Image (cartoon, helix red, strand yellow):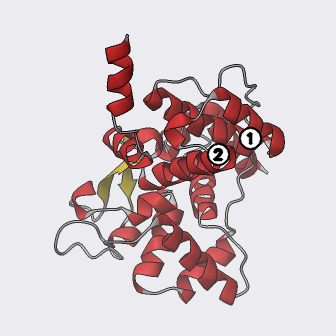
Amino acid sequence: RGRDLMARCMTPPMTLDEFAESQRADGYSASTIRVRVRCVKGIARFADVAASQLTIDHVIGYFAARPLGPWSRRTYLNHLRAFGKWLGVDLIQGIRKPAAPRSTPHPLPEDELMRLTAATHGEHRTWVLLGAFCGLRAHETAKLAREDLSALDDGTAILRVTGKGGRTDTIPVPPVVMKALDLTGSGRFWEGTRAESVSRTVASIAAKIGIRMRYHQLRHRYGTMVYRSSGRDLLMTQRLMRHASPATTAGYAAVADD
């Protein structure tokens, strides 16, 4: 036992960089890894301990001192569960996890989409089209690579998308998007671009023409239009939106029927 204790003491403490590397190996997106590290780092700073020394008592103390809304609480617990699993410690044992709050999609209206596409140019217009006509999230748009596309003879293409939780799906890409993409060369379309840049840039351009929006509303627009144009086919909408649960897709159906 003495030798085991000495060995543990001599082992360098695990770092958040190692945790991030492990998450990348598991296929999580850069944005997910970034917010997980930020969450763990914030709680460790509050508890005044190293991240590798976090315990369930530190987590309880943090939640007791920092009241969070249901959605934020669920998100923090998910991040802590992932970090605790990697660390080999249950950091959320006995902490109640709120039910997932229902969220209503807010699709960007068609007239505002037309104004936005007219006001954007080059890669910024392509970002708008990818959200509105392919349903890509900001982080999926940012990391899009030419190798993800398989062009077809009719001017369309099939796109392989790795989304939430490392899940990979394929979706069709219409001609309006294909025409906007620069297919020459290889690798990522916008090397070094981050999800935050995509979101903020599009929102900033929209604000200049009097439109208040989030990039994700383009995806909401895609979901409601798919549901309408497919003859109210909920299963097809779920597959193209890449939802894990049909309950999520049902929200789009309700908005499209309104």
Q: Which residue is mark 2?
A: 43
Q: Which mark is residue 196?
A: none
Residue at the (53%, 43%) spot, across then down: 50
Q: CA distance from mark 1 to mark 2?
A: 7 Å
Specify the farthest residue to the front: 2
Tell me where residue 94 sits by quadrant. top right
Does residue 102 appear anywhere in the picture? no
Q: Is residue 56 above or below residue 22?
A: above
Residue at the (39%, 20%) spot, across then down: 5
Where does the image place residue 256, in percent across and percent down from the top left? 70, 51
* Contact (Cβ within 8 Å) of mark 1 with mark 2: yes
The amino acid type found where label 2 is placed reads: Ile
Q: Which residue is mark 1?
A: 62
The amino acid type found where label 1 is placed reads: Tyr
Is residue 82 left or right of 116 when viewed as pictured? Answer: left
In this orientation, which residue lies closer to the viewer: 258 or 25?
25
Residue at the (46%, 30%) spot, across then down: 87
Where does the image place residue 35, in percent across and percent down from the top left? 55, 52
Where does the image place residue 95, in percent across and percent down from the top left? 73, 25
Secondary structure at badge 1 equals helix
Tell me where residue 192 sits by quadrant. bottom left
In this orientation, which residue lies closer to the viewer: 3 or 201?
3
Is residue 16 left or right of 57 when viewed as pictured? Answer: left
Residue at the (33%, 75%) spot, across then down: 179
Where does the image place residue 52, in percent across and percent down from the top left? 49, 37
Q: Earlier in the sequence, mark 1 or mark 2?
A: 2
For the N terminus, the image quarter is top left
Tell me where residue 93 sits by quadrant. top right
Secondary structure at badge 2 equals helix
